[in-house]
Amino acid sequence: MDGTDSWGGLELSKSIVSAIIEMGYKAPSEIQAASIPWMLERRDVVAQAVTGSGKTAAFGIPMCDVVDPNSRDVQGLVLVPTRELAQQVTRELMLIGRNRGVGVIAVYGGEPIARQIKALEKGMSIVVGTPGRVKDHMNRRTLDLSYVRMAVLDEADEMLDIGFADDMEYILKRTPGTRQTALFSATIPGFIRGLIRKHLNDPRWIQLVSDAKGIETVDEVDQIFYDVAGQDKPDGIMEILDEIDSDSQVLIFRKMQVGVDRLAKGLASEGFPAQGIHGGMSQTERNRVMNSFRDGSLRMLVATNLAARGLDIPTISHVINYDMPENIEEYVHRIGRTARMGKRGTAISFIGEWDFELHETIVAKIGAEKMIKRQFSFY
Ligand code: AMP
């Protein structure tokens, strides 16, 4: 044991405090201050927080603190909806647990399973994975979850949306009933409440977003809207990208994979440093593109909804909805990719022929005072 130290009033292992200070985390963020004390008391927690609030560390710090790094058993389990999120959460947990010697591994589909099996054999304290691949490992008996002490469901609403409900159920049933469980979700619709009733034990509810309007957006995001006909969107995006500072980082959303390919190619042929990412690409290719966007060598990323959730790339200055999302929740997630941790950001949305209804909902729920309406020069 390495003794304890205080971090913003929280008693944590010295090695954890030194690691998070090295990461530049001087004090707990709001969600961390609200949830970490309960997690350290081994209580179940349901936390609803806006994206970019520091929620990974909100569960990552207590998890790295609770596990015994000298044991070969998996004691911490984090389930996430996408591969990219699995990688990102793993990276953060590795940093938090690094001075304590906590082993963390990501398991997700699309990557050779043999490599993950080899890493699991070494004995990892924490497994972060997508439900499908975690279940796969359990069936192969390459992952034993019978010693899990803390389970986290991250972006629980998205996991249910994607269709991971049965896998989550399967996995949770095979972890000890005595485990501690924390559920993080941007929204808590009815079916999440069912999941909570079934799998959490008298949880503490932590809610940092006001539920008055049902939904809150990050105040630091300027939300700009353009009315534009479908065939004029290519001209519109050129006009916008021409005006944006050349050192800004831009995430552009499209609905379909073919649309992503087409737009990325079109922008590249006009001299914009753009590449695409979607679920139809190989994992190697997805990793390559995501890594270059993350390290800043790629400035413009065109993506399907795949990139809407949880991705934390603090340098993203603009999010552009070239195609609008399906609903307001998705809209909030997308624009939450910018203005991370108090920085300012800009969200630009193209309101096409079919998006008027959604636009009205956004205005009604988020408030007209937060919207900026602009017009393209060609209209
Ligand atoms: P998340 O909501 O987990 O995606 O975190 C958003 C960003 O906040 C990430 O870049 C974290 O590295 C950063 N972060 C998390 N906690 C803190 C903290 N206590 N102080 C400063 N930055 C933080």
Image (cartoon, helix red, strand yellow):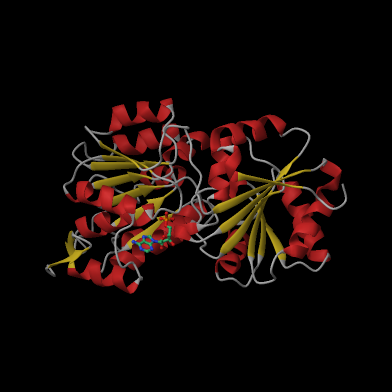
Query: Visible in this render: residue 279?
Result: no
Task: Give x and y (percent) for residue 151.
Answer: 29, 45
Residue drawn at (18%, 45%) of the image: 42
Task: Give x and y (percent) for residue 2.
Answer: 13, 70
Q: Quadrant of the N terminus?
A: bottom left
Using residue 67 as the reference point, say whether residue 361 is left or right of it.
right
Q: Closer to the camera, 162 or 183?
A: 183
Using residue 229 as the reference point, say whether residue 150 is left or right of it.
left
Residue drawn at (28%, 58%) of the image: 61
- Location of residue 136 by image quarter: top left
How many numbered badges does the structure rendering display? Answer: 0
Q: Closer to the camera, 333 or 288?
A: 333
Task: Give x and y (percent) for residue 77.
Answer: 32, 49
Taking the image in four quarters, ligand 1 sits in the one at bottom left
Using residue 233 as the reference point, say whether residue 247 is left or right of it.
left
Query: Visible in this render: residue 310?
Result: yes
- Location of residue 104 by image quarter: bottom left
